[in-house]
């Protein structure tokens, strides 16, 4: 299960508010990165969507793990550094799929309200989702309730494995 995901955006607060609606979450500033916001699901799953300024980039750091870094009331006890020194990318191989209680029409309306491409798609007759293109460049697949149920029935090693290429391989 995905615990949280971080996504770059030109307007982090607005994008976090969209994710707040999608995951039925609460939106608040994310003090780890200046100008960032996070949407945290209310359902107890721990799902969070951290939305950072579009020029943010993760760096591996150089100090000892768990060294303490603090630029304010929040202490970061980890080594990774997030700085706003990255270049904006027009496209990426990254995407995430998340479930939502919203209908496909409601998800499409969120995209339209922000001028983002949003398309209701069928994935091979197995499940459906809405491709929501944040800032028209970052793909987030949002599964409405019916699509989510169909996805969970399909996306198992046995069922998906039969469709993808044969028997599942043991994990290493």
Image: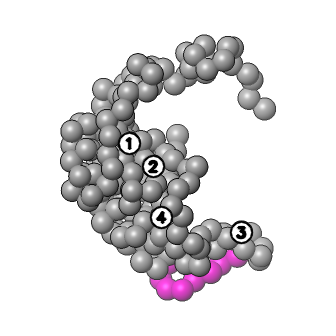
The answer to the question of whether label 2 and label 1 lie on touching residues, with beta carbons closer than 8 A, is yes
Of marks 4 and 3, which one's residue comes earlier in the chain? 4
Residue to which mark 2 is pinned? 139
Secondary structure under tag 4 reads strand
| Picture residue at 52% right of the left edge, 73% below the top | 55
- Nearer-N-terminus badge (1/3): 3
Q: Nearer the viewer, residue 75 or 152?
A: 152
Q: In the image, is residue 143 above or below residue 146?
A: below
Tell me where residue 167 sits by quadrant.
top right
Q: Name the N-terminal-most of marks 2 and 1.
A: 1
Q: Residue furthest bottom?
A: 71
Foreground label between 4 and 1: 1
Separation (CA) of disc 3 from disc 2: 25 Å
Q: Main secondary structure of the magenta part?
A: loop
- Viewed as shown, does residue 123 lie left or right of 2? left
Instruction: Tell me if residue 91 comes above or below residue 68 in the rendering.
Output: above
Name the residue rendered at 38%, 27% in the picture: 122
Q: Which residues are magenta?
A: 67-77
Q: Residue furthest front?
A: 90
Q: Residue 111: where, in percent of width, then height?
A: 28, 51
């Amino acid at each position: 299960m995905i615990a949280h995901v971080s996504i770059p955006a030109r307007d982090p607060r607005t994008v976090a508010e969209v994710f707040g609606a999608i995951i039925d979450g609460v939106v608040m500033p994310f003090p780890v990165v200046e100008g960032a916001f996070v949407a945290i699901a209310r359902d107890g799953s721990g799902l969070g969507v951290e939305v950072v300024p579009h020029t943010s980039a993760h760096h591996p750091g150089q100090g000892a793990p768990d060294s303490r870094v603090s630029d304010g009331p929040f202490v970061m006890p980890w080594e990774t550094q997030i700085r706003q020194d990255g270049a904006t990318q027009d496209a990426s191989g990254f995407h995430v799929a998340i479930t939502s209680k919203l209908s496909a029409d409601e998800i499409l309306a969120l995209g339209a309200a922000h001028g983002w491409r949003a398309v209701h798609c069928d994935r091979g007759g197995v499940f459906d989702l809405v491709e929501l293109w944040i800032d028209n460049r970052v793909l987030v697949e949002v599964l409405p309730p019916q699509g989510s149920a169909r996805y969970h029935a399909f996306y198992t090693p046995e069922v998906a494995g039969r469709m993808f290429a044969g028997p599942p391989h043991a994990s290493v």
